[in-house]
Amino acid sequence: MENGEMVLLRTFLNEKPREFIVCVSEDAFHSDFGIIELSELFRLSPGDRICSHKGQEFIVQKPRMPDMFRHAQRSGAPMMPKDIGMVVAYTGLCKNDVVLDAGTGSGVLSMYLGSIAKNVITYEIKENFANLARNNISKAGLHNVEVRCGNIVEEIDKIEEKFDVVTLDTINSPEVVPKVRRVLVPGGFVVTYSPFIEQTIAIRKALDASGPWDVMTIECIERPLSVSERGTRPGTGGVGHTGYITIARI
């Protein structure tokens, strides 16, 4: 492992996983499982094991996006993995794409997009949120995601780049949609995310007024299964409704 690299340390307590994300350095990491000298990670590789001074054994792994989702600092409710998956699937996001994102928040969506796409430019109106997102993105080891602080309603008129995909997770999406066509490449997509039907209706009206678009709106419901010796059935918890996703293509 290299200096400054982020590492996932996983262990088990009463057969339940516990995990921590740490940075390879000369520092010591303290937890209720004991102290780990992070300098020991320099000589280790993913899959190796490391022990705390109490003898607790950890598996060394490279963190992936679901790990960053769980451990990222939050500035509010981020878009959930189930919804992000729909964005990726219905736009066909790939390694050659350049993405414009607005409503950065804690940077969760930008990190997922950046782990796939060529480049991501994301706008956040609040400076403290933008700084938090930059910190999360840095910890994820992504160098292709740029966080810009500004109001996308105003900033989109100044943007000179062209994008394959535009994602909007902001209350101002209906105001932005009519301006998106100018920055999209032919065949490009705009995807909006909104928790309320009323906002979704406003987005659809804005699309109709600035069309023509090939457009659809979907809702993704996630229901986990509960598995036990007695049997398997739908779980009583999990994530139900989070938001409506509208996908439009020129």
Image (cartoon, helix red, strand yellow):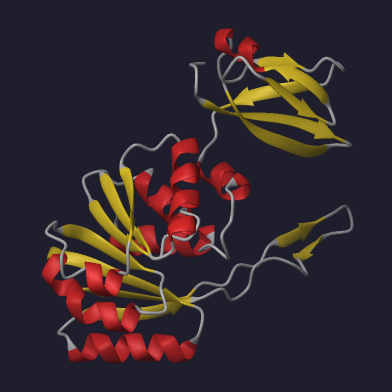
Foreground residue among 175 and 63: 175
Answer with the quarter of the image where residue 7 lies: top right
Q: Quadrant of the C terminus?
A: bottom left
Q: Is residue 13 above or below residue 100?
A: above
Q: Is residue 24 above or below residue 213?
A: above
Answer with the quarter of the image where residue 234 lies: bottom right
Q: Can residue 95 be spotted in the picture?
A: yes
Say left or right for 239 vs 236.
Answer: left
| Residue in view at x 51 percent, y 79 percent | 195
Q: Can residue 250 be spotted in the picture?
A: no
Find residue 94 and report its horizontal and vertical position in percent: 28, 48
Say left or right for 14 vs 94.
Answer: right
Find residue 5 and report its horizontal and vertical position in percent: 50, 24
Foreground residue among 186 and 8: 8
Find residue 97 and report its horizontal and vertical position in percent: 22, 50
Q: Is residue 158 above or below residue 99?
A: below
| Residue farthest top in this picture | 43
| Residue in view at x 56 percent, y 60 percent | 75
Foreground residue among 233 and 194: 194
Q: Is residue 210 above or below residue 241?
A: below
How many numbered dots are placed on residues in this image? Answer: 0
| Residue in view at x 15 percent, y 73 percent | 181
